Amino acid sequence: MKLAQCALPLLAVASISAGVLVPGPSDDRTAQPVDPASAGVGRTPTLPAISGIDGSPVSIPWPGSKATVLALTSPDCPVSKRYGPTLAGLEREYAGKGVRFVLVDAAEGANGTDLRAMATGLGLKGALAVDRTWARALGATTTAETFVFDGRGRVVYRGAVDDQYGIGTALPSPRNRYLADALGAVLAGREPKVAATTAPGCLLGDFEAGAGDTLTFHRTVEPILQRACLPCHHDGGVAPFALDSYEQVKRRGPMIRYVVEDGIMPPWFAAKSGSGPSPWKNDRSLSPEDKAALLAWIDGGMAQGDPAEAKPAPTFPAEWSIGEPDQVFALPRPVSVAASGVMPYVDVEVETGFTEDRWVEAVEVLPSARQVVHHVLVFAVPPGEGRGLDELDGFFAAYVPGTSALVYGDGRAKRIPKGSRLRFQLHYTPDGTATTDRTRIGLVFAKGPVRQEVHTTAVHNLLFSIPPGAERHPVVGRLAVPFDVEILSYLPHMHVRGAGARYELIAPDRSRTTLLDVPRYDFNWQLQYILREPKRVEEGSEIVYTAWYDNSAKNPSNPDPTRRVGWGLQTTDEMHLGYLEYVVPGERPGSGEGDLRRSRRMGAAAVEQAFRRLDRDRDGGVTEAEAGTMWGAVREADTDGDGRITLDEAKARFGR
């Protein structure tokens, strides 16, 4: 089995040191207050006039203004793009109050065309400029920094717009509106309560190309990037910018250095096991040698070298990486995606019309607006089955950060029962520009006999409750293995409080082996870990899936650290799912004999015991008030929709 895997944008974070913003610790991924004096607040810098992209002079302070906002930005930095609508809203809010906005793209290689297009799309009316003079004079280091100058040109605020967006984080709404609060204070004749913060964004930097006679781009670095980065960072790829030329890489040298050194890129979170070759077919992590070479090249001045030494550029499919599908299903209508904020999950069902079982040897989920699609899970729902807890039964196909297509070889295929519906579960992450998405799924049918049926299931625990403030709360799920299986892949799934995950195998002799250890789980990268060789698991074994959750205020993605959290579909809830893909040696494809889901269902006695525990008033029914955080896990048993689950409903949904 193989897959297509990509890399998300290169990002960075900053903190204050020695009077300038510099890269900070990897857990400092949202704006944090810092010492104003060290940030240069209170100074009145001399900033020369620069030319706007329309040729007119631009100066700070803006003549006749009560306050001037200098907002650094970049059309290809994801954090900057997400803050675009917020800046546009603030500009409209303060338009009649004597506040002028100036947007400056200070990234190396920036151009006015992209900046103008971004500003036009957002409805920004302020002055636009492409220039590095002011950023250098102010010691700016990220594309998300803002500065507020009073009417005399004194810096009264420096930092982030707010704390809603950061490095791989997004809150439903900001906790602190730093820029708006600073403007309100200046107009009222007061000093801002918070006068300086860090400003997570894409790093700015000044590097001069070195001569170099050993480590050069074409000889050393280009082959590394072609393997680890270009599958996403190419023209037309899912990443917001390409890295397929020397110029494109050089202008982002500081950012590349940061994300590589901090382990953000390339995205790969499986702990290494031993010193031998990686057991993972889709491992895109850098070897220690490649990482050292890349960092040394950046530190040495990023010499280009001889273009004649360049490796042939890889080619990428224009659309389907699996080839032309035999059948394509699309969402019946486009889904509108907001420009900003956090969107709830979207569920859409599509009829297949299949009159017979179909065997699929390759599948790909292809969003039309990949830049805003966080993940898509597709479930094959047989006729007669309702919504249910499809997540527990295993997905049919997926598009998640890092995975877009699956191809099964060696006579293996997945089955779609006749008459099934395809249910799409879509999660969107607005990126600063309103758009629409019409996701499709492409299927390649098996052309010959199917030797092995590929199954998907999940090790899970529904009945968990994460306490408020817990920093590393463990939740354990177990799956009995009643017959021999061969595991093909793993995919741990949690939401924004997910912190780590581990799959373990307890053999019949009770010996314990780690199958996959993900010590740092990242909701932005729900990677599938595909084995080079299937892992044989004996009958009588048990698979243990442990997930850890950070519900503390230290988690920058935590929407509410004061809330007790249980199972639920939305990002603000949590899930505990350790997905597995597997085959059963000797199973007759389509017989259903190898379905581990049957062994996972609870017996009648276990269902009744859990029901009695939740039925606190002993009236023979469980309501949301009684279930509390468990309601998200059990509410699908309420088949008549009366808001109350009876014992018969619970047995029908969760019993054997």
Image (spheres, rainbow, N blue to C red):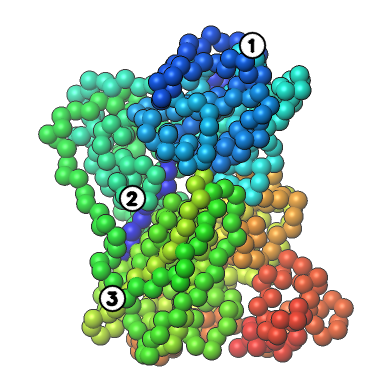
What is the spatial separation of the Cα atoms under label 2 and label 3, in whole angstroms?
Answer: 23 Å
Q: Mark 1: which amino acid?
A: Arg
Mark 1: give few (<14), some (14-19) or many (20+) Cα within 10 Å.
Answer: some
| Residue at the disc numbered 3 | 326
Kindly identify the residue that appears in the image at 14 percent across and 35 percent down: 309
Residue 237 is labelled as 2
Q: Are marks 2 and 1 in contact (CB under 8 Å)?
A: no
Residue 261 locus on image (x, y percent): 43, 35
Q: Earlier in the sequence, mark 2 or mark 3?
A: 2
Q: Amino acid at mark 2?
A: Gly
Q: Nearer the viewer, mark 2 or mark 1?
A: 1
> Residue 440's quadrant in the figure?
bottom left
* Residue 605 visible here: no
Residue 444 x/y as whole percent: 29, 74
Q: Secondary structure at mark 3?
A: loop
The residue under the point 54% across, 49% down is: 339
Image quadrant assignment for residue 322: bottom left
Q: Is residue 268 above or below residue 387?
A: above
Label number found at residue 152: 1
**Quadrant position of the C terminus in the picture:** bottom right
Query: Do labels 1 and 3 touch, CB within 8 Å?
Result: no
Give residue 418's quadrant in the image: bottom left
Q: Relative to 334, does residue 498 appear above or below in the rendering?
A: above
Answer left or right for 200 relative to 561. left
Q: Nearer the viewer, residue 654 or 278?
A: 654
Locate residue 609, reporting x and y percent.
75, 82
Whole-angstrom CA distance, mark 2 to mark 1, is 46 Å
> Sequence order check: which comes first, mark 2 or mark 1?
1
> Residue at position x 26%, y 45% from top?
226
The nearer-to-camera label among 1 and 3 is 1
Q: Residue at x 38, y 63 (%)?
A: 366
